[in-house]
Image (cartoon, rainbow, N blue to C red):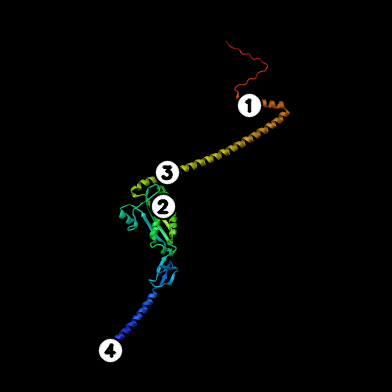
Amino acid sequence: MSEVTTLIKTTLKQFKNYTKVLIIISIIIYILTGIYTVKQNEIAVVRRFGKIVSSNVKPGISYSLPFPIDKVDKIEIKKVQTLGIDHFSEIPEINSEADIFMKKTDLRNYAITGDNNTINLTMILKYLIVDPKNYLINFRNIDSVIQAISQSEIVRYLSVEPIQSVLITNRSEMNLTIRNNIQKKVNEFKLGVEINSVEIKNISPPSIILHYFNDVINAGIDKEKSVKEAYGYKTKVLSQARIRSMEIDSEANIYAKERVSNAEGECEKFNILLKEYEKSPISVKRRHYLDMLNDIYPSLDKSYIVDSKRKIQFKISD
């Protein structure tokens, strides 16, 4: 009996020793679980009982108190996050919010433009996390919040734009305007993200009336083409008119110079003749008289020389 008791005591003593070892090992392992590694493209945020104690743990090996005291959230700050906004799409992504809405209500998704036309579109939004602290603590599901903001800003933008402008206007300008508006709201809500880009895709009227809108768009394109052709013709005609005007001005200047030059020549010729006349009036008159006869007689068929003193009688027949 004493041997059995001794064996039991020995066993219990060994078990206690093993238990102590196991407890010590467990404690060591538990303490070591607080070691974590932050990658180069990550920033870690440490929360102690839900309160942030460190919001910017740099890449490398770090330590925090083991769970459940501390919780470490690793956030990829250099990774571009992508969100698809298909709440206004006729064919949304399967099991998305828009798809569930269509299945439950049997209604089609669409947005309304400023002139009360319906339109379908999808949008791709990309963002970066720039403030891990705000990203973690302000909202539980940031993606859902960003999607809700995006939907609101799309509706806001389309509500003041006519459908013709939405379908034909420069798409990059639309993307930039919506992106800036979303960023303003994101900053107001302190989501800790930066909207990298917004891209409107597959924007079109509902399929049931698409061909009517295509006709309208084609008419608009034809109109724009006609306006450009008319403008080109106008430019061509104005250019030709300007060239002709310059030619006329040049010809007029040349003609004016010729007339002035001729007038100056005649004036100089007259002054010379005047000087000669003042010296010998009779000889100048005679020379002019002969010059006149020389100019007139060649144009006459017959010439008659009559004595100025002879009388000429005409007989008038009965």
Q: Alpha carbon of mark 3 to alpha carbon of mark 2: how far?
A: 29 Å
- Whole-number angstrom distance, CA of label 3 to CA of label 4: 113 Å
Q: Name the residue under label 3.
A: 223
Q: Which amino acid does label 4 sit on?
A: Glu
Q: Depth-wise, is mark 3 or mark 4 nearer the camera?
A: 4
Mark 1 and mark 2: span between their CA atoms?
94 Å
Residue that label 2 marks = 156
Q: Where is residue 315 in the image (x, y as percent from the top left)?
A: 60, 12
Task: Give the residue at the far left of this rendering.
Answer: 1
Report the residue that reaches farthest toward the bottom.
2
When the figure is inspected, residue 262 is found, relative to residue 201, above or below; the finding is: above
Q: Distance between the residues labelled 1 and 4?
A: 175 Å
Say whether disc 1 or disc 4 marks the residue closer to the N-terminus. Answer: 4
The residue mark sitting in front, 3 or 1, is 3
Above or below residue 17? Residue 147 is above
| Residue kind at label 1, given as amino acid type | Asp
SS category of the residue bearing label 2: helix
| Label drawn at residue 3 | 4
